[in-house]
Image (cartoon, grey):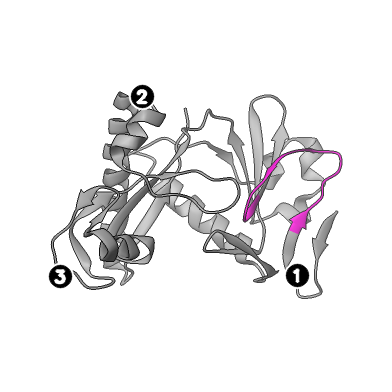
Amino acid sequence: MTTETLDSVLLQTDFRDLELFASGKVRDVYQIGSDHLLFIATDRISAFDYVLATGIPHKGQVLTQISLFWFDFLKELVPNHLVTANVSQYPAEVRKYADQLRGRSMLVRRAEMFPVECVVRGYLSGSGWKEYNASGSVCGIKLPAGLRESEQLPEPIFTPATKATTGHDENISFEHMSQLVDPEDARMLRDLSLAIYKKAADYARQKGIIIADTKFEFGR
């Protein structure tokens, strides 16, 4: 069962015989056995850390296909949690919802999440621009004076944030991050995030797309 409008906007899932693990700003997650999760991208809109009342038809399907592309593109650089997005390969108790899951869901391996969001910025915009205007730095990283909004940075920078289940995420320094996770893990996450961003941004640039900044979440 799902909650949908006549325009096929999926705002909320309600698979009553599956165990709901979490419901985020955009995705609903169900527990499948002890080792797997079912990720479902709804059509909810999240802006500035708030979920809006209306959705966009098929937004979840678009998000899922983008995720699948990047998982495949980056798989030689970093492993991922994807098991399959082919609904016919899902467990039997899940396949009965195939019409609602096709194109917008993924079966993934469970992982222990690092409690931080790994943000990389190649351009000065959003909360980074606001912080730069106030202090001349972003997440403790001093930047050259006189930069303009949305200007490309000399080099991409790693600007982590706390991971909030509700409300606003908070930008933090790398030193603060190193107190939340093991310092060696913090360095590994920073270096990996920068490497992923650079590879993805280089590819996107060839297609006429600018990835101004992006966020990664890691587990193990």
Magenta span of residues:
12-27
Q: Secondary structure at mark 2?
A: loop
The three-letter code of the residue at mark 3 reads Gly
* The furthest residue to the bottom: 7
The three-letter code of the residue at mark 2 reads Asp
Measured as percent of width and height from the top left, residue 38 is found at 67, 41
Q: Answer yes or no: do the residues labelled 2 and 1 have beta carbons within 8 Å?
A: no
Measured as percent of width and height from the top left, residue 111 is found at 54, 29
Q: Nearer the viewer, mark 2 or mark 1?
A: 2
Decide if residue 107 is on the left or right side of residue 214. right
Q: Answer yes or no: do the residues labelled 3 and 2 have beta carbons within 8 Å?
A: no
Using the image, determine if residue 199 lies above or below residue 52.
above
- Dot placed on the residue nearer the N-terminal end, 2 or 1: 1
Q: Which residue is mark 1?
A: 8
Decide if residue 207 is on the left or right side of residue 116. left
Tell me the crowding category of disc 1: few under 14, some 14 to 19, or many 20 or more residues within 10 angstroms, Cα based. few
Measured as percent of width and height from the top left, residue 113 is found at 51, 32
Using the image, determine if residue 8 lies above or below residue 60.
below
Q: Which residue is mark 3?
A: 146
Whole-angstrom CA distance, mark 1 to mark 3, is 47 Å
Q: Which residue is mark 2?
A: 182
Whole-angstrom CA distance, mark 3 to mark 2, is 35 Å
Quick check: is 196 in the magenta stretch? no
Q: Nearer the viewer, mark 1 or mark 3?
A: 3
The three-letter code of the residue at mark 1 reads Ser
Return the residue nearer the eye: 105 or 120: 120
